[in-house]
Amino acid sequence: MKEINGIVLSWVVISFCFSLSSIFEPSLFLATFIVSALTAGIGFLLHELAHRTTARRNGCYAYYQVWLWGLILALFISIVSAGRFVFAALGAVYIEPMILSPHIDEKGIRRVYGKISLSGPSMNLLLAIFFICMMSVGGIVAEISYIGLRINLWLAAFNLLPFPPLDGSKVFAWSKIIWAIFAVPTWIFVLFIS
């Protein structure tokens, strides 16, 4: 139950942070919040659940834990920047360390953790593709989908930075080639749609 509460709290906070630019327009704020929940919130939620699912499939014990300072920092930065910049490290999936055995060496552990770390940004990239497809519907769906595309590309690009504790650092430690295959095109797309 604690994990579910943390996920829901993180979902609400990230949706609020992404909708802060319209907070002084009450009629627009609710709509912006709903769009943020459907784009940024879903992106964040599925990103973390992808980590957890991949970890569990690889024999690890994994659970999402909200990070209180991450919530505070996200709210503070979003308020100060009037919603123009969002710090999206509200929590993380914690994984019980794998134990070295004759069947799993250090390189094998780096590979497993690299795959677990890559699953989150990969989910954001899949969501970006989904939103690209939905843009063809037109109208309000296309507008919401464009927002979803931008947010999910940004979440993937941010998380693929090769600095600890971000996902990109573990992918980079596992395979620089796989990291580059995912990170470089993602950053190019982010620059292209900005």
Image (cartoon, grey):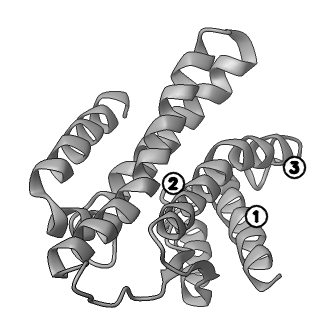
Which secondary structure, mark 3?
helix
Using a 10 Å C-alpha cutoff, classify the residue at mark 3 as few (fewer than 14 neighbours), some (14 to 19) or many (20 or more).
few
Which secondary structure, mark 2?
loop
Which secondary structure, mark 1?
helix
99 relative to 1, above or below: below
Q: Nearer the viewer, residue 100 or 21?
A: 100
Q: Quarter-wise, where is residue 80 in the image?
A: bottom right
Q: Nearer the viewer, residue 65 or 56?
A: 56
Residue sitting at the far left: 177
Using a 10 Å C-alpha cutoff, classify the residue at mark 2 as few (fewer than 14 neighbours), some (14 to 19) or many (20 or more).
some
Q: Quarter-wise, where is residue 139 in the image?
A: top right
**Residue pictured at 29% horizontal, 28% vertical:** 192
Q: Residue under circle 3?
A: 26
- Left or right of 145 in this view: 2: right
Mark 2 or 3 closer to N-term?
3
Camera-side mark, 3 or 1:
1
Mark 2 or 1 closer to N-term?
1
CA gap between label 2 and label 3 equals: 18 Å
CB contact under 8 Å: marks 3 and 1: no
CA gap between label 3 and label 1 equals: 17 Å
Q: Nearer the viewer, residue 175 or 169?
A: 175
**Residue pictured at 61% horizontal, 53% vertical:** 46
- Left or right of 99 in this view: 76: right
56 relative to 29, above or below: below
**Residue pictured at 37% horizontal, 85% vertical:** 98
Camera-side mark, 2 or 1:
1
Q: Amino acid at mark 1?
A: Val
Q: Residue under circle 1?
A: 12
Q: Amino acid at mark 2?
A: Arg
Using a 10 Å C-alpha cutoff, classify the residue at mark 1 as few (fewer than 14 neighbours), some (14 to 19) or many (20 or more).
some
If the image is split into quadrants, where does the C terminus sit? top left
Q: Residue under circle 2?
A: 84
